[in-house]
């Protein structure tokens, strides 16, 4: 899979080769966000249609309890099933799971039952817990060779960059980063972009549509 960043606010400038590889049935969508992320997530989820059926795992940097409120808000206001993660939750189509504040979230194989999430109280990574890098590292391991769509939204720091590198090495991973002019803080997306790991840069209001196109194989 090619690894380069392009400014993609219209379909003509999208990395077509990467999309063709990733969109042969997306197995998992992962989203990372931090400062400004709750509003960004509301924008994305507000535009995703009911038939968006890929499983979604979300790391939003927030303290304990706040992630539960975020998940409840997204679940109540929008069309998809959204919940805060608990040990043993199944990773399944049509469900979005938000990592709980104060704990790392990973995905692992449940023998004969697909994949499920587990929560860890291990040390902070990149100064945060939950960390996108911790989740992405587990995805790279458990979804080796599978098709992953990664979305990095507004946020401070570099959490997620190393994990996306690992997913691109182990999976067919296509990465969308939020554009600088629509970020509250252009930190996490910038780090992914500057590392050459962003396949496409999109304005916030375009990201849900691009996710839907790619998951539907119409990228």
Image: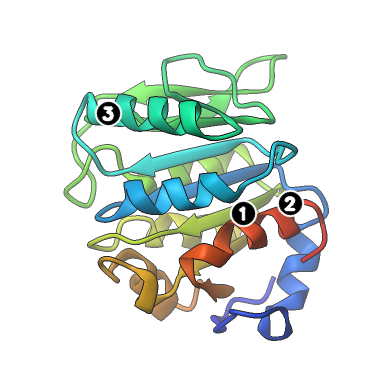
Report whether 161 appears left or right of 61. right
Residue at which label 3 appears: 103
Task: For mark 2, give the secondary structure.
Answer: helix
Query: Nearer the N terminus, badge 1 or badge 2?
Result: 1
For mark 1, does the 10 Å Cα neighbourhood hold few (<14), some (14 to 19), or many (20 or more) residues?
many
Asked if residue 39 lies left or right of residue 157, the reply is: right
Q: Is residue 160 above or below residue 146?
A: below
Q: What residue sits 23% from the left and 62% below the top?
A: 157
Q: Residue furthest front?
A: 77
Horizontal placement of 85 versus 78: left or right? left
Dots 3, 2 in contact, CB < 8 A: no
SS of the residue under disc 3: loop
Circle 3 residues within 10 Å: few <14, some 14–19, many ≥20: many
Residue at 35%, 74% in the rendered image: 190
- Estimate the spatial distance between the alpha carbons at disc 1 and disc 3, rounded to whole Å: 23 Å
Tell me whether the residue at label 1 lies in contact with that at label 2, contact meaning CB atoms closer than 8 angstroms.
yes
- In terms of depth relative to the viewer, which is nearer, 167 or 177? 177
Mark seen at residue 149: 1
Specify whether residue 140 is in view.
Answer: no
Name above or below for residue 128 compared with residue 97.
below
Q: Quadrant of residue 173?
A: bottom right
Q: Residue at x 39, y 62 (%)?
A: 161
Residues at circles 1 and 3 in contact by the CB criterion of under 8 Å: no
- Provide the residue designation for mark 2: 215
Q: Name the image quarter holding the N terminus.
A: bottom right
- Mark 3 and mark 2: Cα distance apart in space: 29 Å
Q: Position of residue 99 (x, y in %)?
A: 37, 32
**Mark 1 vs mark 2, CA separation in Å:** 8 Å
Q: Earlier in the sequence, mark 3 or mark 2?
A: 3
**In the image, residue 201 lies at what x, y percent?**
52, 75
Of badges 1 and 2, the one in the foreground is 2
């Amino acid at each position: 899979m090619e690894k380069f960043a392009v400014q993609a606010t219209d379909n003509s400038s999208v990395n077509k080769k990467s999309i063709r590889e990733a969109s042969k049935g997306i197995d998992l969508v992962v989203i990372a966000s931090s400062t400004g992320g709750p509003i960004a997530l509301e924008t994305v989820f507000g535009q995703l249609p009911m038939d968006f059926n890929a499983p979604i795992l979300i790391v939003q940097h927030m303290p304990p309890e706040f992630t539960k409120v975020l998940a409840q808000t997204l679940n109540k206001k929008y069309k998809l099933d959204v919940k805060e993660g608990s040990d043993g939750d199944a990773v399944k189509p049509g469900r979005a799971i938000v990592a709980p504040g104060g704990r790392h979230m990973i995905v692992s194989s449940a023998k004969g039952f697909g994949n499920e999430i587990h929560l860890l109280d291990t040390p902070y990574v990149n100064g945060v817990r939950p960390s996108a890098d911790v989740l992405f590292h587990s995805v790279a391991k458990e979804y080796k060779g599978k098709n992953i769509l990664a979305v990095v939204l507004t946020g401070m720091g570099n959490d997620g960059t190393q994990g996306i590198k690992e997913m691109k090495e182990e999976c067919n991973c296509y990465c969308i980063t939020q554009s600088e002019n629509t970020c509250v803080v252009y930190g996490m997306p910038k780090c992914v972009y500057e590392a050459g790991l962003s396949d496409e840069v999109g304005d916030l209001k375009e990201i849900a549509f691009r996710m839907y196109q790619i998951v539907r194989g119409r990228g």
